Image: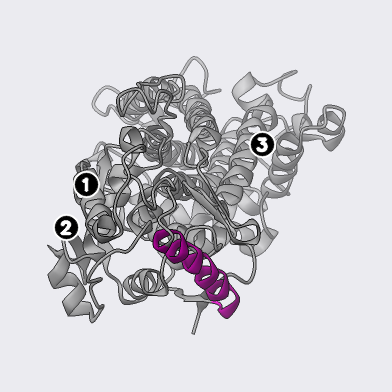
Amino acid sequence: MKKLVIGVEKIRLEDLINVTRNGYKVEISPEAYKKVDEARALVDRYVKEKRVSYGITTGFGKFSDTVISEEQTGELQRNLIMSHSCGVGNPIALDAARGIMLLRLINMTKGHSGVRRIVLETLVEMLNKGVTPFIPEKGSLGASGDLAPLAHMVLVMLGMGKAFYNGELLDGKVAMERAGVKILDSLSSKEGLALINGTQVMTSIGAHVTYDAINLMKHLDIAGALTLETQNGITCAFDPKVHEVRGHKGQIDTAENFRKILANSKNTTKQGVLRTQDPYTLRCIPQIHGASKDALAYVKQKVEIEMEAVTDNPIIFCDTDEVISGGNFHGQPMALPFDFLGIAISEMANVSERRIERLVNPALNNGLPAFLVKNGGVNSGFMIVQYSAASLVSENKVLAHPASVDSIPSSANQEDHVSMGTIAARKAGEILKNARNVIAMELLSACQGVDLRESSDKLGEGTKKAYEEIRKVVSYYDKDRVMHIDINTVEDLIKSNKIVDAVEKVLGDLK
């Protein structure tokens, strides 16, 4: 059985995807359970000794100075979950919602949260049996944790709220019963707070976007290479010497990808043969694509740190017998990277759209028919493909405005600076969807250009494989037809990763 054991090794981005998309089961190691038990014992002792400790024997936020009796602690935790369930909007995607549960588990198994084993076991059972809470996408400020959306996750654990099970949206209690997962009768001291005070919503959403963007970048390289084939592009610009003297890894890797993808192409040329140089969107591909690759690598690094992070408040330290109220719930360390993520993906679409324009514009496309269609006038061809791509990249420019530069005080000014990191992650996801469509359009346009040149037999080793995969599902455009069907088909092909798989099968892994 494919499984992920929590508490043995550090969790990587690929581990998260294996659980959320690839059906891996989850298990907690004995070593992790030992830490969990020690932290819980400390919480129980603090309650028994009537120590004043934030979140254990006090209220929350502005009520942090209100002491709660031992008899009221269970009611306090349950009320916390119900009152904080203030999310609105559409549900977070199922894979991201599963990621939220997994990341919250990882956080609580570090031994700094003070929850009972049964809380962790409930989440494990939900993941392994396919109960996924309906978590509204909007309502988090990204500081004091992702309070509202995480509260909706916990509602289902208590037999409230709504959840998806076997493709149906059900009442939380019904979903749990059908799956055979025991509902928690109650929450004990600190457990409600431990379940909702953290950055797992923004981190899960942003992690999935990061993973998909890394894969989309390979498609962008392939699309750019196909466009180069149609434009008799100059390959001297990909000479490794050019990129080594600058030194940026993404740039060096991109140039290497293009040398591999275009290997043995009879369509490309050298400087001085047909012309001295290409326009920037062709000549500067390593610099443009490479910068986004470096940004994605940075965001992935930050994501993997946060996936392993303890983001509770307060944090329990058993070795020193302390419970410290700090600010690890604050999303600022992820808000800035996720804004950067959105900008990096937006630039991927920007350069792709400019290459589409070069392909359809008879003043720029080196002799191809206007709008990539014969009998222009009767046929509009790819005219509105570029129009649609331009719309998407324009929308991305609005979405790429950083969320992290904004802050609105909350909780009677006790929480007077917030990160908006969850908004940043969600925006990056919308930008990704737009970029994927634009790149699908470039792939379609470039394959049409190849056919109009009658040059498919002259393609490079990688571009030939990509062309063949696309032509398996979308035929040559000989006259006008409903274009959105073709675009959606290639977008689905990108999602399936079949193009990259076919190219990597003959060339090895792209960078």
Q: Identity of the amino acid at label 1? A: Ser
**Camera-nearest residue between 108 and 414:** 414
- Secondary structure at badge 3 equals helix
- Secondary structure at badge 2 equals loop
Q: Which mark's residue is nearer the viewer, 3 or 1?
A: 1
Looking at the image, is mark 3 or mark 1 earlier in the sequence? 1
Q: Which residue is mark 1?
A: 85
Q: Identity of the amino acid at label 3? A: Asp
Give the residue at x 20% y 45%. Answer: 83
Q: Is residue 330 visible?
A: yes
Q: Are the two marked residues, 2 and 1, in contact with CB atoms closer than 8 angstroms?
A: yes
Q: Which residue is mark 3?
A: 294
Q: Are the two marked residues, 2 and 3, in contact with CB atoms closer than 8 angstroms?
A: no
Q: Identity of the amino acid at label 2? A: Gly
Measured Cα–Cα span from mark 2 to mark 3: 41 Å
Q: Where does the image place residue 291, in percent across and percent down from the top left?
A: 65, 30
Q: Which mark's residue is nearer the viewer, 2 or 3?
A: 2
Q: Which residue is mark 2?
A: 161
Q: Where does the image place residue 149, in percent across and percent down from the top left?
A: 29, 46
**Camera-nearest residue between 489 and 157:** 157
The part of the chain drawn in magenta is: 29-48
